[in-house]
Amino acid sequence: MNINNEVTALNDPPRLVLLLGGARSGKSTFAERLAVQSGRSVAFIATAIATDEDMRDRIARHQASRAANWQTIEEPLHLVNAVQQAAVVADVIILDCLTVWLSNWLFSQGDAEQLEEDTAISAQYYAGALQEIDVLLQVVAQLAPGKTLIVVTNEVGLGIVPAYSLGRIYRDVLGLVNQRVAAAATRVYLMIAGLGVDIKRLHETATL
């Protein structure tokens, strides 16, 4: 799909764009290219935390790829506040990424071992994460005209089933979160080997 056509679409502009795919599929690069080529002001919401050397290296590489005039907001948990803050200073907001945010949110809820062992607590986690997303989507819907949020997330449901229960809970909830955001998004791109396919457009035009 020609990215120049998508730049025209961003200039419409859509209120919400979702980019999802596997690791190293080109999600972040595609999001940044959309933002840059739109010619509009950009803010970047980074959810990653430098917990080890590898993560510090990843964060540094992402920082180096961003334009110098972008506003960067580092927020691992409170997405609503971050989006509201970003919308004050920019027209295009990149949220990178929901996958890391959900991991942060999970471990902020308390004892991970208890979450694995107690089905009532895991059910609360499902409901709580989706409630967080619903509030975020309400805020996005109320942004001023001309604002665009580009959300980056991972598709983790195509691999093997995790061997431990916490991993399965995380996979399942992320799948539900992605569905909720995709339903509200104007454009949904599946990233494969650096190429973005607008799967929402294909879904809307599909017939038997």
Image (cartoon, grey):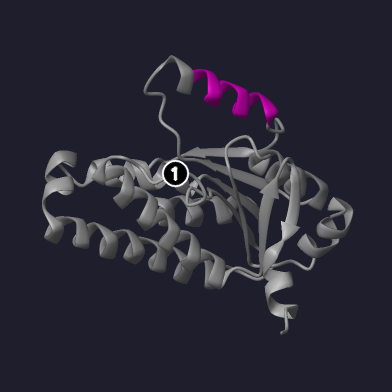
Camera-nearest residue between 189 and 131: 189
Camera-nearest residue between 21 and 110: 21
For the N terminus, the image quarter is bottom right
Residue 37 screen position, x and y as percent = 82, 47
For the C terminus, the image quarter is bottom right
Left or right of 129? Residue 90 is: right
The residue under label 1 is 160
Residue span colored magenta: 56-65
Work out whether residue 91 can be spotted. Answer: no
Local crowd size for mark 1, using a 10 Å CA cut-off: few (<14), some (14–19), many (≥20): few
Is residue 142 placed above or below 166 in the rendered structure? below
Q: What's the magenta bit mostly, secondary-structure-wise?
A: helix
Left or right of 27? Residue 10 is: right
SS label for mark 1 = loop
Is residue 134 placed above or below 163 in the rendered structure? below
Is residue 68 placed above or below 6 in the rendered structure? above
Residue 19 screen position, x and y as percent = 63, 53
Is residue 76 placed above or below 10 in the rendered structure? above
Left or right of 61? Residue 172 is: left
Camera-nearest residue between 203 and 33: 203
In this view, the residue farthest toward the top is 53
Q: Tally the numbered discs.
A: 1
Residue 23 screen position, x and y as percent = 57, 37
Residue 35 screen position, x and y as percent = 73, 48
- Residue drawn 77% across the image and 61% down it: 10
* 102 within the magenta span: no
Residue type (three-letter) at the residue carrying disc 1: Ile
Work out whether residue 123 can be spotted. Answer: yes
